[in-house]
Amino acid sequence: MKARSIVAACAAFTLALGVAADGRAQDSYPNKPVKLLIGFPPGGLLDTVSRIVGERMAALLGQPFIVEARAGAGGLIATGALAKSAPDGYTLMMINDNHALNPYILKEVPYDSVKDFAPIGFVGSTPLVFNAYPGLGLKSIKDLVEMAKAKNGGLTYGSVGPGSLPHLSTALFARAAGVSMTHVPYKGGAPALTDLVGGHINVMMTSLVVSKAHIEAGRLTPLAVAWNHRLGPLPNVPTTAEAGYPLDAAYWFGLMAPAGTPPAVIGKLEKALAETVAQAEVRKRLADMGTLVTPMNAKEFGAFIQSEMAKWRDAVKSANVKIE
């Protein structure tokens, strides 16, 4: 009995120490700058969203959130770095839809997309806009389908890389419409957009944040929004569903930490993120970019990631996309 009592006392003491340590982690965190990784170059949608969110979280938590771009391999480099980071809350990442795509489009992914990470919370999503070069004279998705059928593979569509969301989404659209178009992959959004505006490629799905100025200036023609309802900044542009080709294609973004990060630290970050995206100024800045702010807590975000992985696993197979 005495031995069992000693064991029980030791277990209780150990538990108390753990609770105390967790509590101290929550009380003192953060006491130095927090690094916020992104997997794509500065200046794009992910960078912009990360800076807006990081700026407000820094104000709430009292330490700078420093956005660091580690571009390459569709986000694989940055995500791999996050997986190997110390689980102390000082290295985080604003992940995007590529997190759910990469396991199915890349030959080797050096981490487990679920087990090696701790979700913090979801920010929102930015539906893609199907844009065309104005010189083609296209005004609608119907026009695009008719021209694609007439040219039989002669129309080109750009993307930010093989296996990217614009690539897969356009491939799925073409499959549903029964048309053939030629894919032209780029190493990033900037060169692809430049070629689209210049007429070197015919159409491309883009985020509104990078295409809005070109649309307003008449340098791009928006044919449809790849979503289930219209976007506020483009009220007169129909959805692909309205055109007869239902397609939900959106860049999304949420905050992630390495697996093993103390629950108290995750909780503090989760609370700060929720307060950040609840701010009217933040919501307006994101909405003006065509972003739909739909907050999720850590548990909900984790479930969302797994549902997105299942969705794109089937989509990749359906589109018969192969990445060399």
Image (tube, rainbow, N blue to C red):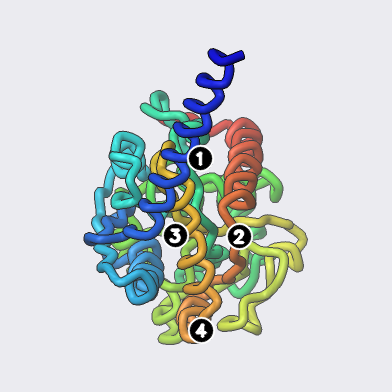
Who's the residue at 55% across and 63% down the image? Answer: 125
Residue drawn at (48%, 29%), measured in percent from left and top? 322
Q: Measured from the top left, where is residue 109 in percent x and y?
A: 40, 28
- Tag 3 and tag 4, C-beta contact below 8 Å: no
Residue 217, x across and y down, in percent: 41, 86
Total residue callouts: 4
Q: Nearer the viewer, mark 3 or mark 4?
A: 3
Please, what secondary structure does the residue beneath circle 1 have?
A: helix
Task: Look at the numbered disc 2 and give the secondary structure of its residue.
Answer: strand
Q: Give the number of the disc on residue 269.
A: 3
Relative to 263, residue 250 above or below: below
Secondary structure type for disc 4? helix
- Cα separation between marks 2 and 1: 20 Å
User: What amino acid does circle 4 point to?
Assistant: Lys
Instruction: Choose the circle earlier in sequence order: 3 or 4.
Output: 3
The quarter of the rendered structure image containing the C terminus is: top left
- Distance from Cα at disc 2 to Cα at disc 4: 18 Å
Q: Nearer the viewer, mark 3 or mark 1?
A: 3
Amino acid type indicated by mark 3: Leu
The answer for how far apart the CA atoms under marks 3 and 4 are is 22 Å
Which residue is tagged 1? 101
Q: Viewed as shown, does residue 152 lie left or right of 81?
A: right
Q: What amino acid type should be assigned to the residue bearing mark 1?
A: Leu
Q: Amino acid at mark 2?
A: Met
Residue topped by disc 2: 296
Q: Earlier in the sequence, mark 3 or mark 2?
A: 3
User: Which of label 4 and label 1 is nearer to you?
Assistant: 4
Of 69 and 317, the residue lying toward us: 69
Residue 284: which disc?
4
